[in-house]
Image (spheres, grey):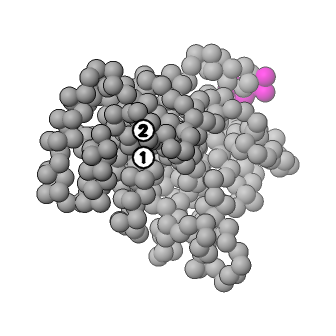
Amino acid sequence: MQYLKNNRRTISKEINSIESRSQYSSDIQRVLFALSPGTEVLFIEAVGNMGDILASIGSLRNFKERYMHLSLVFAIQEKFLPLIENNRFITRGFGYTFGMDTYDYAVVFDLSAICSEWESRNFPDITETRPEILNKYLELPEKEKYTSFYQVSENEKRVADQFLKERNLQDKKLVGIALKSAELYKDYPIEKYETVVRTFQDRKEVHFLIFDQSIEVTWPYKNYTSIYGLNIREVAALLQRCSCLITVDSGLLHLAGVLIIPIIFLYGISSWEARTKYYKAINISSKLDCIPCWRGKDQRCKKLSEKDIMHRSACMEEIKVAEITEAILEIIDERGCTCSR
């Protein structure tokens, strides 16, 4: 099927052209429908992190619903394999190794390459979510909502309940904070998160869960618990108990979205449309005219004068704590929050 794979790459380069798509659309569908029942189709997410994988699963779900006779095989970084446990749309998953796309699979789709090609052509006006991009590339029917799939097991729910019970948190209104993203330049200053937590000291019914796998926060307040050192599935079980999650562009953003947890999304580098369009989210940014810039880790923020500081971003630093606290109150006090702004 090398001919098929090459055609798909051609189509992806012409993906904005209806004429070029229609030239091949009947062919790809005919080929896929003609494959024998049980034939394995390989999807690769070679470099993607948690958010990329969770967002891609939405398209795999749509693919499986259209081609029910095919078996979906998903190759990802081995450390993220727990994300696809209990996924009824994926036949099996395993750790990605370089060159596996040359193995004996009928059809191979490199999801990272598909999305990076699309984003490079549409830069900087990127408003499509990853599932939208992949759905268009795979010529799947349009969806009103592009939903992923993640299921917390009953045992994991019990573990989370026990965790909260041991800390007398089972009756609290829990607010999660995803402390950091995978890239420093997308982060919100930690001292401002601390201010958010301090603001709620007198609200005894509110407690913050600070999620970070690398550090334990040691702020001088009693209204938070630092969550670190847990595996992905344990984090998901605790996140499911939260009233909302405050997050930047992170993996937990997409995990909360999949779990239908209200999100307070702090953005500037990326756009809210491309990240939270189909999530239950309140989107908060500063008022700079450069948003979103989509800059990479090797580019400095043009709004900052310190040329040697690559990890800081003016748009993130200027987001006001007051807007975050207002959004929290909007959710936990149930003041008619629709989580759509």
Badge 2 crowding class, 10 Å Cα cut-off, few under 14, some 14 to 19, many 20 or more, is many
Question: Residue furthest toward the bottom?
Answer: 305
Name the residue rendered at 25%, 60% in the picture.
14
Name the residue rendered at 81%, 44% in the picture.
216
As measured in the structure, the alpha-carbon distance from the residue carrying label 2 to the one carrying label 1 is 7 Å
128 with respect to 20 (left or right):
right
- Whichever of callouts 2 and 1 sits on the residue coming sooner in the sequence is 2
Q: Quadrant of the N terminus?
A: top left
Q: Position of residue 189 (x, y in %)?
A: 70, 61
Q: Position of residue 154 (x, y in %)?
A: 58, 16
Q: Secondary structure at mark 2?
A: strand
The residue at which mark 1 appears reads as: 111
Which disc, if any, is residue 82? none
Start and end of the magenta stretch? 166-171
The residue at which mark 2 appears reads as: 43
Say what amino acid the circle numbered 1 marks: Leu
Name the residue rendered at 50%, 33% in the picture.
259
177 with respect to 70 (left or right):
right
Residue 78: in magenta span: no
**Res. 210 visible in picture:** no
Q: Position of residue 49 (x, y in %)?
A: 57, 46
Report how many numbered discs are placed on residues in the image.
Answer: 2
Badge 1 crowding class, 10 Å Cα cut-off, few under 14, some 14 to 19, many 20 or more, is many
